[in-house]
Image (spheres, rainbow, N blue to C red):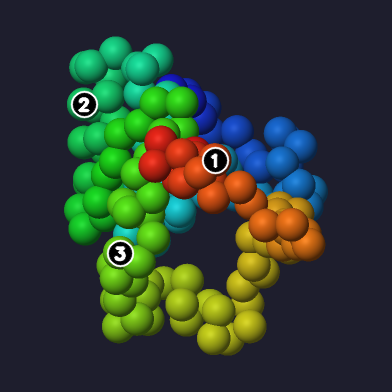
Amino acid sequence: AVNFMKEYRKGHRLCDRSLGAEETDERSITQLLVDQVECANLIVLNKMDLVKERNATHLEGLLRKLNPKAKIIHSSFGRVDVKLLLNTRSFDMAEAEQMPGWYQELQGNHVPETLEYNISSFVFRAQRPFHPRRLDKLLANGF
């Protein structure tokens, strides 16, 4: 939340900021932010403790204009109730198919963000399981 409006207003190109975009990518950070907000079912505004109330109201108003259907959650220090994130049943395939990016994807004209911005993930595997009480405490208090 604290950086969204700053980045939104600057209009810097992705390739100018060393964000993993190719030099030929002419999109701005603003365009990337808008694309992500428009397609979101859920928007988590983190670091709300650093945002003045009037700025938070302005930001939330902008987000609601970009995506009136998305649920907006406020958090600080990344603390979000896991129940608000998982198994929400908020994804609607029919709605997703109506989004402009969907057609581009079907035509093979879209490069996934995982490749475009070098986003990766991993699977943690271990012989010993997580400690049940510590894991439960982490999940109860949010990430």
Of callouts 3 and 2, which one flags the residue occurring earlier in the amino acid sequence? Answer: 2
**On the image, numbered disc 3 is attached to which residue?**
88
- Name the residue rendered at 67%, 57% in the picture: 129
**Residue that extends furthest to the bottom in the rendered view of this protein:** 107
Q: Quick check: 89 left or right of 25? A: left
Q: Position of residue 19 (x, y in %)?
A: 72, 41
Q: Residues within 10 Å of mark 3 (few under 14, many from 20)?
A: few
On the question of residue 8 being in view, the answer is no
- The circle on residue 57 is 2
> Callout 2: helix, strand or loop?
helix
Closer to us: mark 2 or mark 1?
A: 1
Q: Quadrant of the N terminus?
A: top left
Q: Judge left or right: residue 138 versus residue 15.
A: left
Q: Which mark is residue 44?
A: none
Q: Quadrant of residue 46?
A: top left
Q: Nearer the viewer, mark 1 or mark 3?
A: 1
User: First in sequence: mark 1 or mark 3?
Assistant: 3
Residue at image coords 53%, 33%: 11
Separation (CA) of disc 3 from disc 2: 25 Å
**As drawn, 23 above or below 98:** above
The numbered mark at residue 134 is 1
Residue plotted at (21% across, 58% down): 69
Q: Label 2 amino acid?
A: Thr
Residue 53 appears in the figure = yes
> In this image, 77 relative to 18: left or right?
left
Q: Is residue 123 above or below residue 84?
A: below
Task: Where is residue 10? Give x, y as percent.
Answer: 52, 27
Q: Amino acid at mark 1?
A: Arg
Q: Secondary structure at mark 3?
A: loop
Q: Percent from the top left, x then y, of residue 63?
A: 29, 42
Q: In this rendering, which labeled residue sits more in front, label 3 or label 2?
A: 3
Q: Is residue 73 above or below residue 24?
A: above
